[in-house]
Amino acid sequence: MARMKFLCDAERCIECNACTTICKNEHEVPWGMQRRRVITLDDGEPGEKSLSVACMHCTDAPCIAVCPVDCIYQTDIGVVLHSKDICIGCGYCFYACPFGAPQYPQASNFGSRGKMDKCTFCAGGPEPDGSEAEYYNYGQNRIAEGKLPLCAEVCSTRSLLAGDGEILSEIYRERVVNRGYGTGAWGWGTAYYDTEAEI
Amino acid sequence: MARISGLIAAVVLAVLLGWTVYATWFGAPNVVLPTGGVIDRGPEDTVPSGPDAQQALRDRTELQRWRGVSGPAPDEPADTALAGGQQLPSDGDPDPAQIVQGWLADREANFEILRDREFLRGVVNLPDPRGEVLQQPQGRDWRRLHNNEVTYGGGWIIFGFSLLLALLLAIRGRIPLKEGFSGRKVERFNALERANHWVVAVSFLLIAITGLVLLYGQIFLKPWMGAGAYSGLAEVSAYVHMAFMVPFTIGVLLMIVLWLRQNLPSKVDWIWLKRGGGFFSDEGPSPPARRFNAGQKLIFWAVVLGGGLLIVSGISLMFPFFWLDIQGMQWAQTIHAALGLIMIAVIIGHIYIGTVGMVGAFDAMWSGKVDYNWMEEHHDLYLRQIEGERGGEGTHGPRRGGHEPHAVPGE
């Protein structure tokens, strides 16, 4: 079973923001919202690191657990998607999300924030794949075309990786062995293995 | 009759409480499983996830290896057959729990590249301070509080407290008017006080019902309404919930203006509380009270302080991140939900004692005029006071076998 994941190699990210920009362009994400963003830790100090972060498509996803109208779902390749027809814009998913991924078109209009928008792993939404309705609501569906998320595919330093988690983990380990250092897979512990639930 | 209804209500509430207790410990496992996109029994999302599609995505992932290994990217994706939204053969619907187990199974293999969970904040080239937080693992704590403690706790508080009231009614019956109705009325609340009370009451009821819809509709309404219809109801509920906050806030502020002075604690309240407000026994006279007895003062302060905190936390939720950060928003939401549920239980108690629980009490807030004997029994000191103000006009009222006014130490 392939399990889709993101991995950002902090040693390679040069904070060029190409992932942020290409994502906004590819999916026509409106003003004020960004599905992906680049965060710099310890800016201007030794050990400064930049990381690109978006929805990590968690195992046991907190957003799905707290959604009061059950508009978010996960597919069997691990991609977390949602239906904007069902969403009521309550903001609970933002409180629960460890990575601040959900975005809302309005900061506040007496609490009505509009429909939530977030990274879809370039897999669209519940509408038929490649349909106009799907594009209007969620942007491109690259997964249906056998392609991976554009943010990772444009990354010039191959810092941001997307795809099957097993292969990503192998790629990252090989890099660590070759260059002799690495700070780990940021966010993986929180996103993919941090569940106290017994199944 | 009242006691039999109380008994029936007690049995029903005991069943509901028992069911809540059962659900708290033996409810559905609190883990999210993949559903393949089925919402409201609708069509499955056609995200390609069959074996061919998975192999195609794996092959594509391989291209991200070092170029010396992966070789040049092919001119055309190897999987053109997948284009055009064509649905792929499904994997034979494997059990969702097995899928998640598979995802968690490689934890040991990846252990060395995992980092500790920690709160991380950096800088971001976006005009949005929310974006600065890279990772906030306490979102999981908020999720647990919201899905377990708050959701089930609400059932415990509301059903539990209602059960106590129903048992009280079954065992004790309504609190009677010992002297019977005199037929003569005294004013208890004037028109402004009553109008304001009902503005707050109606607002609170609407806010409480819509709040319960938002918190529990997913469990009780969505299964038979369907996700689409429930989403509409939830959205309307959210708007009603916020709109009626305006009259509620104005009403509570006016309540403070009208009633604050008379609700300051005094020595009489201590006597009232020590005697349980005459709540549990018909023996002897009711404890003395001025315009508001200690129980009513507690309701007043619960509404002012609890309602005030609900208003503050509610406005914080209406203007997200206006003055709170992510942790502050999580606490505002948790406090708002938990306190709202507690206030619902408190107000259920208030409604009970004002209607079913005590004979003659409802008139005070409805017509504003209560029976002379009721006032004598429950607010004797206030009755003395208003009679004194009217120059003894009311002292020759038809009191039948009334008891002596209570001596109050220190008064």
Image (cartoon, coloured by chain):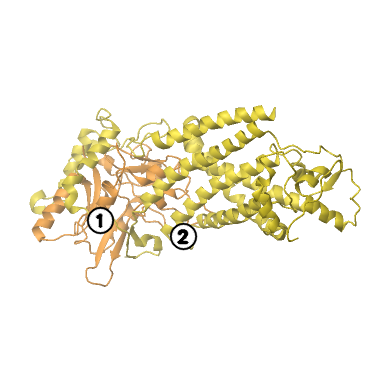
Chain colours: A orange, B yellow
B115 left or right, relative to B361:
left
Closest to the observer: B24 or A73? Answer: B24
Which residue is found at the position 49% from the left and 52% from the top?
Answer: B335
Chain letter of the residue beneath label 2 in the structure image: B
B115 left or right, relative to B208:
left
Q: Is residue B107 above or below residue B116?
A: above
Instruction: Mark 2: give few (<14), some (14-19) or many (20+) Cα within 10 Å.
Output: some
Residue B321 got which mark?
2
Chain letter of the residue beneath label 1 in the structure image: B
Can you give x and y, in whole percent of width and height, for residue B177 in the image? 77, 38
Can you give x and y, in whole percent of width and height, for residue B70 in the image? 11, 49
The residue type indicated by label 1 comes to: Asp
Residue B116 got which mark?
1
Residue A69 got which mark?
none
Can you give x and y, in whole percent of width and height, for residue B137 in the image? 33, 54
The residue type indicated by label 2 comes to: Phe
Say which quarter of the image contains residue A49: bottom left
B119 left or right, relative to A84:
left
Closest to the observer: B218 or B166? Answer: B166
Can you give x and y, in whole percent of width and height, for residue B288 in the image? 74, 50
Say which quarter of the image contains residue B262: bottom right
Which residue is found at the position 24% from the left and 41% from the top?
Answer: B103
Q: CA distance from mark 2 to mark 1?
A: 27 Å
